[in-house]
Image (spheres, helix red, strand yellow):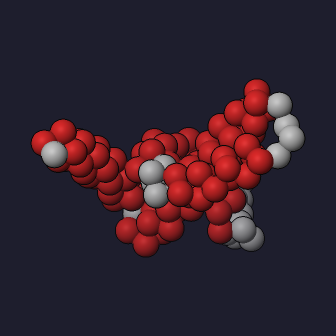
Amino acid sequence: MLRSTASSPLPLASIDWIALLPGIALWALALYLPLSLPLARLEQALEAGSWPPLLQQVVLVGLSLAAAVAVGALTEIGLGLALGPSWASSLGLIAVGWGLFTALASRAREDEE
């Protein structure tokens, strides 16, 4: 039986997405804080609107999760193509650790003042 050796017309169509999920989650977590400034503006815009508070909260949570996952996926795919998927996930883990370290250091500095 002959198998076709032609590649998929879409380069991302053959990616095993389940293998990328841990890296996407790590990058989404690592990049959530830098995304908080645009999300703060969104929160202010929602508060100025006429929607009920529960709907405002649901929209804010949904959009912030979607933004974090989208940026995490783009970062994981970009670094995965440049460095390889395992390196991209490892860098995501390092970024999460660095973010946690700087947050704790900042909090300790504020407690001293």
Q: Is residue 98 left or right of residue 45?
A: left
Vertical position of residue 87 compared to residue 59: above or below: below
Residue 21 appearing in the image: yes
Q: Is residue 90 left or right of residue 45?
A: left
Judging depth in this view, the residue of 55 and 31 nearest the camera is: 55
Q: Residue furthest left?
A: 112
Judging depth in this view, the residue of 3 and 98 nearest the camera is: 98
Q: Is residue 16 left or right of residue 8?
A: left
Q: Position of residue 74 (x, y in %)?
A: 56, 61
Q: Residue furthest top?
A: 54
Q: Position of residue 37 (x, y in %)?
A: 53, 57
Q: Quadrant of residue 110?
A: top left
Q: Quadrant of residue 62?
A: top right
Q: Residue furthest front?
A: 113
Q: Quadrant of residue 31?
A: bottom left
Vertical position of residue 16 compared to residue 7: above or below: above
Residue shown at the point (45%, 63%) measured from the top left: 80
Residue shown at the point (38%, 68%) measured from the top left: 83
Judging depth in this view, the residue of 73 and 87 nearest the camera is: 73
Judging depth in this view, the residue of 32 and 36 nearest the camera is: 36
Residue 15 appearing in the image: no
Q: Position of residue 92 (x, y in %)?
A: 37, 52
